[in-house]
Image (tube, grey):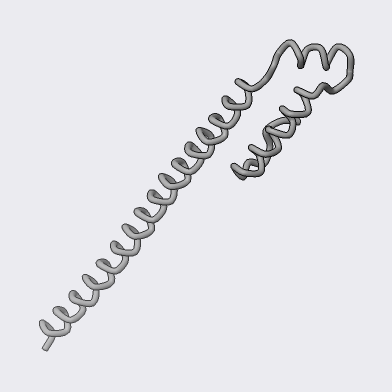
Amino acid sequence: MNNKKMKTSLQKSLIRISIIIVIFISISVGTLCFDIYRRDMISRYQNYAGDAINFLSRCIDVDDLEECMRTGVKSDKYNELQTLANDVKETHDLLYIYN
């Protein structure tokens, strides 16, 4: 009878330990997967925003922008660039492109 109690107790202990190990592994894998997902999403967003910024930087007419800064008057090219930047911001769901 004592041997049977010991065997039942050992089985219960093994089941408890197995459950604890499974929970620990599940939490560890879940945390690791979330961290990988978070890093990937941040990297993708940075690349996405970088592509939008590179596109806009190629559209800037430096001489016209310099003239606008010197005179304090917005030119047609400046207004077009600002409109394009707003459109890129809206269509690409970016929070900020310029100030």
Q: Looking at the picture, does residue 2 appear above or below residue 24?
A: below
In screen coordinates, is 73 left or right of 2? right
Quadrant of residue 49 within the rendered picture: top right
- Percent of width and height locating residue 87: 67, 39
State the quadrant of the N terminus. Answer: bottom left
Q: Residue at 25% of width from left, 67% of height from top?
A: 18
Furthest residue in direction front, as rendered: 76
Q: Nearer the viewer, residue 56 or 44?
A: 56
In screen coordinates, is 13 left or right of 90? left
Q: Residue at 58% of width from left, 32% of height from top?
A: 52
Q: Nearer the viewer, residue 32 or 25?
A: 32
Q: Residue at 24% of width from left, 73% of height from top?
A: 15
- Percent of width and height locating residue 82: 74, 30
Q: Looking at the picture, does residue 25 appear above or below residue 53?
A: below
Furthest residue in direction right, as rendered: 72
In screen coordinates, is 19 left or right of 99? left
